[in-house]
Image (spheres, rainbow, N blue to C red):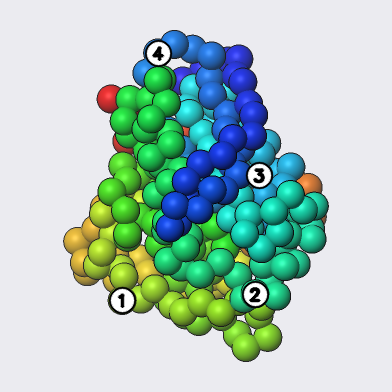
């Protein structure tokens, strides 16, 4: 796909339990039917960086939507305040996350330009949630960018009340792309290698790539952790992966 014109706006969609939640929708102006991408935002929230990522997928020709996972804790609040409220609540409950992503996927499939195929992608906490969604929903592909606590529980000092997903590995329903930093701590290389072994033992379709000299959040251009070479290669792998799995 080639970069093109797009339109973007805030919409409302039905999330977990039928709750109305806000979401950021970006659509290519090309009339050709295309696959959709649910962008699962990181723990800092439904912020400008997450919306920029959503527009990037639309610029590449995909329908894209980023649901505000903190809509219930702090509707209409500043992203930093909403993230603080979500942290104080222990993060997003797993069942609610799955329901919100299911609603976002259904919203994309209902768009006139959809070819019916949908993937998820998430970074950091969103990477774990992308994996969870891929184990819980009928998706066509999923990308986990350095998602922590897939096999292990967060340390006690972390503001998250979530459990490991070790017992869900065998439930993976779609191809998975994992992109990790070899210098990351959460997830560390040992956890990534263990997840790779468990997915292989379960006979799942997946591709993992780890980057030497890169730590957590190496995709994030606004942080000192950004690593241009790793991010560029990661994006090329994402475009190739979605090109193979989201085409009609």
Placement of 238 over or under 210, stated as above or below? above
Q: Nearer the viewer, residue 97 or 166?
A: 97
Which residue lies under the disc numbered 4? 32
The residue singled out by tag 2 in the image is: 89
Q: What is the crowding at mark 1: few (fewer than 14 residues within 10 Å), some, or many (at least 20)?
A: few
For the residues marked 2 and 1, what is the alpha-carbon distance in whole angstroms?
Answer: 24 Å
Lower position in the chain sequence, tag 4 or tag 2? 4
Q: Please tell me whether mark 3 sits on a helix, a strand or a loop.
A: helix
Tag 3 or tag 4, which sits nearer the N-term?
4
Which label's residue is closer to the chain start, 4 or 1? 4
Residue 102 placed where, x, y %? 39, 49
Choose the circle earlier in sequence order: 3 or 2: 3
Real-space CA distance between mark 1 and mark 3, rounded to the nearest whole angstrom: 29 Å
- The Cα atoms of the two marked residues, 4 and 1, are separated by 40 Å
In the displayed structure image, the side of residue 61 where residue 8 appears, left or right:
right
- Earlier sequence position, callout 1 versus callout 3: 3
Q: CA distance from mark 4 to mark 2?
A: 42 Å
Image quarter of the C terminus: top left
Q: Give the percent coordinates (x, y) of residue 153.
A: 50, 82
Q: Nearer the viewer, mark 4 or mark 2?
A: 2
The label on residue 50 is 3
Number of numbered callouts drawn: 4
Instruction: In this rendered view, identify the residue nearer to me: 20 or 88.
Output: 20
Q: Nearer the viewer, mark 2 or mark 1?
A: 2
Callout 4: helix, strand or loop? loop
Distance from Cα at disc 4 to Cα at disc 3: 25 Å
Which residue is drawn at the image coordinates 58% and 29% (left, top)?
26
Q: Which residue is mark 1?
A: 167
Relative placement, left or right, of 103 versus 231 is left
């Amino acid at each position: 796909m080639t970069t093109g014109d797009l339109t973007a706006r805030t919409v409302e969609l039905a999330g977990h339990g039928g709750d109305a939640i806000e979401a950021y929708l970006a659509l290519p102006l090309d009339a050709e039917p295309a696959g959709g991408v649910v962008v699962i935002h990181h723990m800092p929230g439904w912020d400008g960086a997450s919306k920029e990522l959503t527009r990037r997928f639309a610029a590449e020709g995909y329908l894209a939507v980023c649901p505000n996972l903190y809509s219930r804790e702090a509707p209409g609040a500043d992203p930093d305040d909403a993230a603080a409220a979500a942290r104080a609540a222990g993060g997003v409950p797993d069942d609610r996350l799955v329901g919100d992503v299911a609603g976002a996927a259904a919203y994309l499939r209902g768009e006139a330009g959809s070819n019916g195929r949908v993937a998820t992608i998430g970074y950091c906490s969103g990477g774990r949630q992308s994996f969870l969604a891929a184990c819980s929903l009928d998706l066509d592909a999923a990308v986990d960018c350095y998602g922590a606590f897939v096999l292990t529980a967060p340390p006690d000092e972390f503001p998250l009340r979530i459990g490991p997903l070790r017992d869900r590995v065998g439930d993976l329903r779609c191809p998975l792309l994992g992109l990790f930093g070899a210098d990351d701590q959460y997830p560390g290389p040992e956890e990534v290698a263990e997840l790779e072994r468990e997915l292989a033992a379960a006979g799942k379709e997946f591709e993992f790539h780890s980057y030497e000299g890169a730590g957590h959040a190496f995709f994030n251009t606004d942080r000192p952790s950004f690593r241009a070479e790793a991010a560029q290669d990661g994006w090329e792998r994402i475009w190739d992966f979605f090109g193979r799995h989201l085409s009609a």
